[in-house]
Amino acid sequence: MSALEAIELGKRYGRRWVLQQVSFSVQPGEVYALAGPNGSGKTTVIRLVTGLAFPSAGEVRLMGQKVHEGGWALRRHLGAVVEAPAAFYPQLSGRENLERLAWMAGLRRAASRIREVLAQLELMAVADQRVATYSLGQRQRLGLAAAILARPDVLVLDEPTSGLDPVGIGKVHQILAEEASRGAAVLISTHHLREVSAYVHKVGILGGGRLVDEVIVAAEKARHRIRVDDPPRATALLRTLPSLQNVRLRGEWVIVEGAVEGAVDALVAGGFKVFEVTRDYFDLYEYYRERVAHG
């Protein structure tokens, strides 16, 4: 069963459709990224799947139940930050805000869990300061701390790295990957496609209020690139090996899919000098640019 599923989702304001026929699903342990230019519908999707807006067509299912009918009991499975930075009581400290959220969630051993997420988001130094004094980046990180506080089954975040410095961006990506590793279904909207391509499983590309493409990133990661002394001849040799697929030349590199160890053995046996073998990661950002430009 999908942890989160959008089925033919649509949203209309008056006569104008801002979102039409958007369908996707996120499984437990999976990270799904929504990408698209400004105005493509990313935040509208986030608001619909979290129950903050009602769809004009279609439905959203959370843990197999309709999110707009499940009430509080169902939404306890959900952790979310929509239209960041998240709203907090500015006169209270970060720790006090998290204590109130833990109480509402009925969280056991709340004090230790609050310390854990504050440390995880590197907020211990400001934990007892009023949120009104926090920087934008600190409020962003506090929002993520609140979202993961109760270890939700589904985590939904709208541009979670907005306003963060490079170190903060890396920390957020690390935490999202860890949340998926423990079994959470993670949905994010993002512009940081090169950073998220290291750990996301799927990317949905939105354009004009529609889902114009869906990329299974994990399926794009089985490629390697090999640098040799005679790339054209090496390419011709490797194309004869049944254990390899889609062998092609890219500049001084030979790109292969399949058993790279066998490729190296064949090259050495054929008298080639092999200088370097590395993973050839799928360039999600370039794919996105190309897809949106011709979408």
Image (spheres, rainbow, N blue to C red):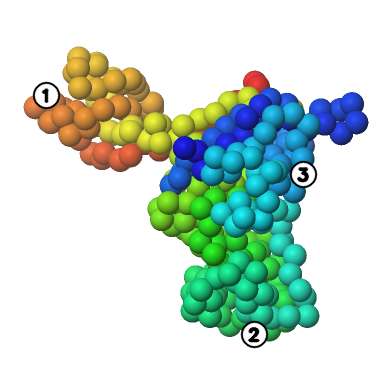
User: Would residue 292 appear left or right of 117 to someone viewing this image?
Assistant: right
Give the residue number, with chain letter if any, for mark 1: 270
Q: Residue at left 66%, top 27%?
A: 8
Q: Residue at left 40%, top 31%?
A: 220
Q: Amino acid at mark 1?
A: Gly
Residue 44 percent location from the top left of the image: 74, 40
Give whichever of 209, 57 is nearer the camera: 57
Give the residue number, with chain letter if any, for mark 3: 53
Describe the element under mark 1 as helix, strand or loop.
loop
Q: Amino acid at mark 3?
A: Ala
Give whichever of 48, 252 is nearer the camera: 48
**Labels 2 and 1: the sequence-earlier one:** 2
Q: Residue at left 43%, top 47%?
A: 29
Residue 249 percent location from the top left of the image: 35, 23
Task: Give the quadrant of residue 253.
Answer: top left
Q: Is residue 261 above or below residue 195?
A: above
Give the residue number, with chain letter if any, for mark 2: 128
Residue furthest bottom as drawn: 128
Describe the element under mark 2 as helix, strand or loop.
loop
Q: Quadrant of the C terminus?
A: top right
Foreground mark, 2 or 1?
Answer: 2
Give whichever of 209, 234 is nearer the camera: 209
**Pointers 2 and 3 in contact (CB under 8 A)?**
no
Q: Is residue 30 visible?
A: yes
Residue 214 percent location from the top left of the image: 54, 29
Residue 109 percent location from the top left of the image: 49, 77
Instruction: Give the distance between the C-alpha atoms of the residues marked 2 and 1, in whole angstroms.
Output: 66 Å
Q: Is residue 126 above or below residue 278?
A: below
Instruction: Give the distance between the C-alpha atoms of the residues marked 2 and 3, in whole angstroms.
Output: 34 Å
Q: Amino acid at mark 2?
A: Asp
User: Would residue 61 appear left or right of 259 to someone viewing this image?
Assistant: right
Foreground mark, 2 or 3?
Answer: 3
